[in-house]
Amino acid sequence: MSIPISDHDNAGAPVSQQALANVRDRIAEAIHTSGRDDKAVELVAVSKTFTADAIIPVLEAGQRLFGENRVQEALGKWPELKQQYAGIKLHLIGALQSNKAGDAVGLFDVIETIDRPKIARAISTEMKRQGRDVELFVQVNTGAEPQKAGIMPEDTDQFVELCRNKIGLKIVGLMCIPPFDEEPSLHFALLSKLAERNRVEMLSMGMSSDFETAIAFGATHVRVGSAIFGQRTQRIV
């Protein structure tokens, strides 16, 4: 059963802070079990659909990396939060439309969802125009799901080369969202192989239900939402 994010534990601490501590402990244990460096994995707290009031307790607990799906929603809450809390780093983890490229480059520090030449070129243009250096990941549709964004696995090598050599982007990572009804380790292993082949150091993979498995397969970033904030009951327009 999920607990509303406004609830507190018996000691008065917000439940989201207790949940964050639990997730951090699980990440540390997974890193240890995998024999990796203590600082090998970064937690991206997925705050999509949650209001600033729900996010503040997690910020107060020291979390500074957050993920959002929609540019417009993020614009409604993060500029003010960034003024209040130093060191925030925002990841765009949702599909990006080219007409939102300017806003995305202006707000986000990392864009994980580069998946077609049009978006790559739009991001390149905006980074030059705004003088911003945003970290970029290519999203790979490891399950070849027609309803899901991402470049097909067999096209990844060519697309990464296009981004680097033709468009002039520095691709630092790959990202995937495995099909919910398939064994995630197969997809994590595939993404890891693609990253190694393309000399990409960062892997964004693993969510609330499978981030420990992702860490075992080399994830450098895990995207965890419901295990921290609880089930989503609202959407910010």
Image (tube, rainbow, N blue to C red):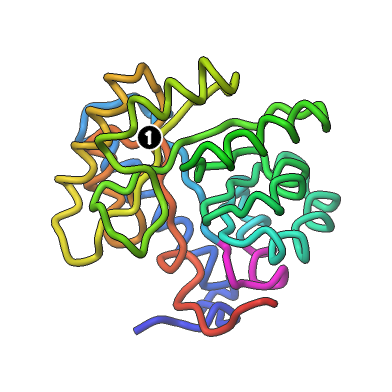
Amino acid at dot 1? Leu
In the foreground, 83 or 10: 83
Q: Position of residue 145 (x, y in %)?
A: 28, 59
Where 5 sits versus 129, above or below? below
In the foreground, 63 or 188: 188
Quadrant in which the N terminus appears: bottom left
Is 208 left, or right, of 235 in this rendering?
left
Where 166 sits versus 193, above or below? above
Q: Does residue 236 show up magenta in the picture?
A: no
The magenta stretch spans which residues?
47-57
Q: Residue at horizontal 53%, vertical 68%?
A: 16
Where 127 sits versus 232, above or below? above
Circle 1: is it few (<14), some (14-19), or many (20+) Cα within 10 Å? many
Q: Position of residue 21 (x, y in %)?
A: 46, 56
Q: Which residue is mark 1?
A: 203
Is 164 left, or right, of 51 in this rendering?
left
Q: Residue at horizontal 51%, vertical 77%?
A: 9
Where 202 sits versus 97, above or below? above
Q: Position of residue 219 (x, y in %)?
A: 33, 37
Quadrant in which the C terminus appears: bottom right
SS for callout 1? strand
Q: Residue at horizontal 51%, vertical 41%?
A: 114
